[in-house]
Amino acid sequence: MPKIYERPLVYRIAKKYIASSFKKFYNEYIVLGKENIPAEGPFIFAPNHLNALMDALAVISVSSHDYATVFLARADMFNKKQVADFLTFAKIMPAFRIRDGIENLGKNAEIFDKCVEVLETNNAMGIMPEGNQELERKIRPLVKGIFRVAFSAQEKIGTAKNVKIVPVGIDLGSLKKAQSHIIINIGKPIDVAQYMEVYKENAPVATNQIRDELKKRMESLVLHLGTEKHYAAFESVTRIANILMLKEMEMTDNTVNRFYARQEIGKRLLNIEKNEPEKGDQLDALCSDFENLRKDLNLYISNFDTKQKTGFQTFIQGIGLAALSPILLTGFIFNALPFFTPVLIRKKLNVKFEGFYSSLHYGIGIITFPLFYITQAILLLELTGLAWWLILLIIPFEYYFGKWAMKLYKKFRKYFGELNHQQVKKNKPEAYNQLLKIRKSITDMVLNNKG
């Protein structure tokens, strides 16, 4: 029986396609700290868990083709044979929980033995240390499974090699939509061997020590809004004060620096909650008022930090966008079917949990996009009588026009958002000024708190 960590040719080809298409799913694919990934096994990737399959694919996209990366996933995903066969091909093994039936918990011993074997053979594991998936941007309490695997592997390997746990922070521009950003932030690995002496004397103490260290490192790699009481308000503040914090930190405006600015906002918010709890309650009320009024006025947060254009500049920008609209139309024509088909299927399946949206859209899209591109190219050649070799040009044409169309769509949306912003400012000055007043109260509270 083949081992799960073996890498047949079909798997290696599939992995390259998956990694390549995964990167194209986002408009910005950013990897930080890649030098922290060990050159060879044994090691365990430990990512935060916000977005179902996409978190595992993020790890696969940064892992080398020189070793296998085997994951653990919920056992209930393996209930159907066809799905179980695919998951096994994708190098995913089941982990059983109490909800899967107490009688099944004993099967975890065999699974953990297989995990140890993966590490013994200098391959990598991918284990979500939070255990379950949630939508809130914070590191939740870590479960013990990952540490059980790490200590067991280190015991079996001995002093020949050190097992390492590599913390990974994943930041997503959107949990639901394609063509947002993804930042994969890889931290310095934890050397499990350094905890073995304590582990041999007192396993629970060693487990708590390494768990605390991993949690601390993971929190430093993500936007960690570790609040139970004020989460919605804190998440709102990270968007409201993002650009102002960027300016205070004297950093250029780009996706990575905006992420660092949001992290700093998150730290200050947690400091406020800890040391000035009454201000946390005040922020909660202010953010609720701000979001309600902003939505009533149909304004985007991003437009508050956009430099106001003159009438002439707005007119010229409008002319330029109108001139580029044929690209938007062409891109839409060639990409509407593959783009909307996954959305329609998701709605047909009645998927409610937003954390599954991207995974479902991506999984369907890696089939629908090539299928529709090839079909549309064949139909175009049949209708026009053009030479068949042109299919080699038409398919890339369809893809790139889709990418350009998406970028243009965002520019159109921003343009009309700015127009609406100026109209609201002009026609509803009282409501607009009230919104600015609330916004200033929020940002002052955060920017003036430097811990």
Image (spheres, rainbow, N blue to C red):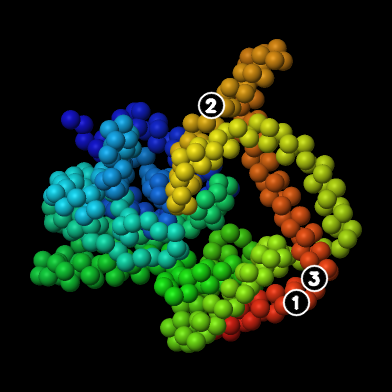
Q: Which residue is mark 1?
A: 433
Where residue 325 sits in the image (x, y, percent)?
78, 40
Q: Could you tell me which residue is drawn at 23 percent across and 49 percent down?
A: 100
Q: Could you tell me which residue is drawn at 68 percent across and 50 percent down?
A: 410
Check contact, mark 2 vs mark 3: CB within 8 A. Answer: no
Count how many numbered circles sit on residues in the image. 3
Q: Which residue is mark 2?
A: 371
Rendered-image quadrant of the N terminus: top left
Where residue 84 sits in the image (x, y, percent)?
29, 36
Looking at the picture, which amino acid does disc 3 mark?
Lys
Label 3 secondary element: loop
Callout 1: 10 Å neighbours few (<14), some, many (20+)?
few
Where residue 207 sits in the image (x, y, percent)?
20, 67
Callout 3: 10 Å neighbours few (<14), some, many (20+)?
few
Q: Between 97 and 379, which is closer to the camera in this rendering? A: 97
Looking at the picture, which amino acid does disc 1 mark?
Asn
Label 1 secondary element: helix
Label 2 secondary element: helix
Q: Which residue is mark 3?
A: 428
